[in-house]
Image: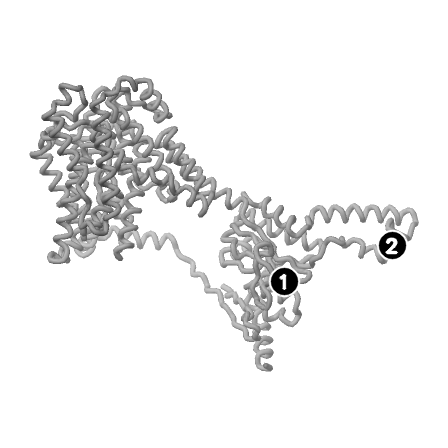
């Protein structure tokens, strides 16, 4: 195989040159490679088995190295605090999921144990999450209408594992934030009926938010005064405590257990005040103790909930990995995204046999863990023990707890997501397109449905990317005075134009979707459409031939025949060469290559040279395969340049035509190497 060399001139106003040699690509036998990988993966040795187990259960790696004296107190403290927070949240989020409180407690218990064994993050708190609970609740309500008895969410959880991680890489920060905010509005709406104690059917399908608010206002006269007063008091207490906690969080060693205090006090007041019997206030009811026997998934149900599991899987996986990466970066360690996928998947699969529902990492509880001294996932085990204590002994004590108190806890926990509305002006200032993505995703999630909102956000975000590449920035460049650098003539002042040369920049890949925009921008900025100019010239030539046939030796413009050629060059063409800055063109497809070949041909017909500068290797390879440089690449050294300045020097300084080479084949380059060596020795 011929090796090809690249020679360029150093841009420091010296005559020294250097050569760049393209590496020879070694052809890889894919069949042999696949066979070797398959043989390696199928082999089983004790060491390989050990590594597999330690990779699949990361706890086996870090637990033997656990620094007990250094870590234990922080883990115990954070575990206890999270366990105390988990209990009221688990009972509250059961309202969102449309399930009994016992199922939320099961979910919190099993998720913490499994993530302790399989997770790679030391700090994230995995368990119940308001957004996931809402999405589960929508499916549960639908299935209850179809099937009067939905005893567990086993099949739903099992289905999640197969979908987890799919298309998650397409979720941008704007999509996630918009989705979370829109879903928060839906969650808030779903809890209003508990706040004021009215009984309205749980809305299903699209437009749930609007329908729910219509039903609320229709039945507002049936509001329970006891629930309204209780809700008002609880919200004031919770919000005040949260604000105080946020203001003095640097002075507090651990966050105030406000939710637990509110639940204990409210339960005692409700029990001894007999609010359910006297004022008909809705209460949690009996919460059984112990564990319900495990049950095999209903595989027929999996087919019905498969589509519902997909958005749940995406949200669960993305939130968990995002939080894991964020805290791993903050505390200087690494996580493995693939292992996180397995960890979250098994946090959904195994508990599904024990009547749990979907789970994910939660930001609020993770922040609490880190602020209370968490060092490892030992804290998750401590939290699970607290939940286990409630499951075995304390659950019946919450019988008299009012549902409006649980609704208050949920609504106050949405403060962070709802505050995103305050960030809209700053977000708009930073990036208008990302703000539009946020607004569209939030609106679709709130006004249509959470699943549709997520899909709309992903599709709209991808469309925005396509539109950006379809209509990217284009510019004519001028030279920064006394330098070898070139910039946008409209963005910077005091730039010098290069006589008889136009330098065009296109800031996007060149492919089928933006081909027409590329050509229109080029023709507009250079003030020359070669196709129109060629047509004008043909028309002019026909007119001249008619004059000559009539025996008139003068042209239509009164010029002699020998002067006609000069008239063919239009006065508006003020350049003789075009340099295309390809530094922002990351790739070319077939249409892109053909577009460059087209402008090369069209401008050549007008005696205008076209040079390419700053091409990356993949673009060069695409041009070669597309035949841009001809069959033998003989003209390559006069068409392709390492920098814009090299191309300009090649055009305006004849003596630089040797030293400005970008590419030449091995045969041609030998003569240039001898010439360069000779010129350098004379300096």
Label 2 Cα neighbours within 10 Å, binned few <14 / some 14-19 / many ≥20: few
Asked if 400 appears above or below 502 in the picture, the reply is: above
Q: Is residue 332 above or below residue 556?
A: below
Dot 1 lies on which element?
A: strand
Closer-to-camera residue (617/215): 215
- The x, y position of residue 315, in whole percent, is 31, 39
Residue 149 is situated, as x and y percent measured from the top left of the image, at 21, 21
Name the residue at the right extreme.
Answer: 551
Q: Residue at x 14, y 41 (%)?
A: 384
Q: Is residue 533 visible?
A: yes
Quarter holding the C terminus is bottom right
Question: Which residue corresponds to the image point at 19% horizontal and 45% vertical from the top-left?
Answer: 255
Q: Which residue is mark 2?
A: 559
Check disc 1 and report the residue beneath it: 496
Q: Which mark is residue 602?
A: none
Q: Quadrant of residue 505?
A: bottom right
Position of residue 448 measured from the top left corner of the image (x, y, whole percent): 38, 28
Q: Position of residue 490 (x, y in %)?
A: 59, 54
> Which of the marked residues, 1 or 2, is nearer the chain's N terminus?
1
- Residue 53 seen in this snapshot: no
């Amino acid at each position: 195989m011929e090796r090809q060399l690249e020679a360029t001139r150093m841009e420091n106003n010296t005559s020294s040159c250097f050569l760049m040699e393209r590496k020879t690509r070694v052809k890889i036998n894919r069949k042999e490679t696949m066979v070797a990988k398959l043989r390696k993966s199928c082999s089983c040795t004790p060491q390989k088995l050990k590594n597999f187990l330690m990779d699949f259960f990361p706890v086996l790696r870090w637990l033997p190295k656990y620094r007990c004296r250094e870590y234990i107190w922080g883990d115990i403290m954070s575990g206890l605090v999270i366990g105390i927070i988990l209990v009221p949240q688990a009972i509250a989020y059961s309202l969102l999921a449309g399930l009994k409180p016992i199922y939320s407690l099961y979910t919190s218990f099993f998720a913490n144990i499994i993530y302790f064994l399989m997770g790679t993050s030391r700090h994230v708190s995995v368990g119940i999450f308001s957004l996931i609970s809402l999405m589960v609740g929508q499916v549960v309500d639908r299935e209850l209408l179809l099937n009067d008895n939905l005893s567990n969410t086993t099949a739903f959880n099992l289905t999640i594992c197969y979908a987890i991680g799919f298309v998650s890489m397409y979720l941008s920060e704007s999509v996630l934030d918009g989705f979370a905010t829109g879903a928060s509005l839906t969650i808030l709406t779903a809890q209003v009926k508990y706040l004021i104690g009215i009984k309205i059917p749980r809305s299903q399908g699209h437009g749930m938010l609007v329908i729910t608010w219509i039903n609320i206002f229709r039945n507002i006269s049936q509001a329970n005064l006891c629930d309204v007063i209780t809700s008002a008091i609880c919200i004031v207490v919770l919000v005040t405590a949260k604000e105080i906690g946020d203001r003095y969080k640097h002075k507090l060693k651990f966050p105030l257990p406000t939710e637990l205090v509110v639940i204990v006090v409210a339960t005692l007041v409700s029990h001894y005040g007999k609010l359910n019997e006297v004022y008909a206030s809705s209460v949690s009811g009996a919460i059984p103790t112990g564990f319900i026997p495990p049950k095999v998934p209903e595989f027929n149900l999996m087919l019905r909930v498969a589509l519902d599991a997909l958005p749940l899987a995406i949200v669960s996986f993305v939130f968990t990995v995002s939080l894991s990466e964020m805290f791993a970066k903050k505390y200087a360690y690494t996580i493995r995204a693939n292992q996180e996928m397995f960890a979250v998947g098994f946090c959904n699969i195994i508990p599904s046999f024990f009547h749990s529902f979907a789970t994910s990492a939660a930001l609020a509880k993770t922040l609490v863990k880190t602020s209370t001294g968490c060092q490892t996932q030992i804290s998750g085990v401590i939290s699970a023990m607290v939940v286990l204590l409630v499951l075995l002994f304390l659950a019946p004590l919450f019988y008299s707890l009012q549902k409006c108190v649980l609704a208050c806890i949920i609504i106050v926990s949405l403060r962070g997501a709802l505050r995103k509305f305050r960030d809209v002006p700053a977000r708009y200032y930073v990036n208008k397109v990302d703000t539009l993505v946020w607004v569209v995703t939030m609106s679709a999630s709130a006004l249509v449905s959470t699943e549709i909102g997520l899909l709309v956000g992903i599709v709209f975000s991808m469309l925005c990317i396509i539109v950006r590449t379809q209509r990217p920035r284009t510019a004519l460049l001028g030279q920064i005075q006394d330098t070898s650098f070139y910039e946008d003539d409209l963005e910077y002042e005091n730039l010098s134009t290069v006589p008889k040369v136009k330098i065009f920049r296109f800031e996007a890949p060149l492919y089928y979707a933006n081909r027409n925009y590329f050509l229109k921008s080029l023709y507009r900025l250079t003030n020359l459409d070669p196709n129109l100019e060629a047509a004008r010239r043909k028309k002019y030539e026909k007119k001249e031939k008619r004059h000559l046939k009539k025996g008139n030796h003068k042209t239509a413009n009164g010029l002699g025949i020998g002067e006609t050629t000069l008239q063919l060059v239009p006065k508006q063409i003020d350049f003789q060469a075009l340099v295309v800055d390809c530094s922002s063109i990351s790739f070319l497809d077939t249409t892109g290559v053909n577009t460059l070949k087209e402008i090369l041909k069209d401008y050549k017909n007008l005696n205008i040279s076209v040079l390419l500068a700053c091409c990356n290797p993949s673009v060069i390879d695409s041009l070669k395969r597309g035949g841009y440089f001809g069959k033998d690449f003989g003209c390559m050294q006069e068409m392709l340049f390492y920098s814009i300045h090299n191309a300009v020097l090649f055009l305006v300084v004849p003596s630089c035509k040797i030293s400005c080479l970008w590419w030449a084949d091995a045969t041609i380059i030998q003569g240039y190497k001898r010439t360069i060596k000779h010129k350098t020795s004379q300096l």
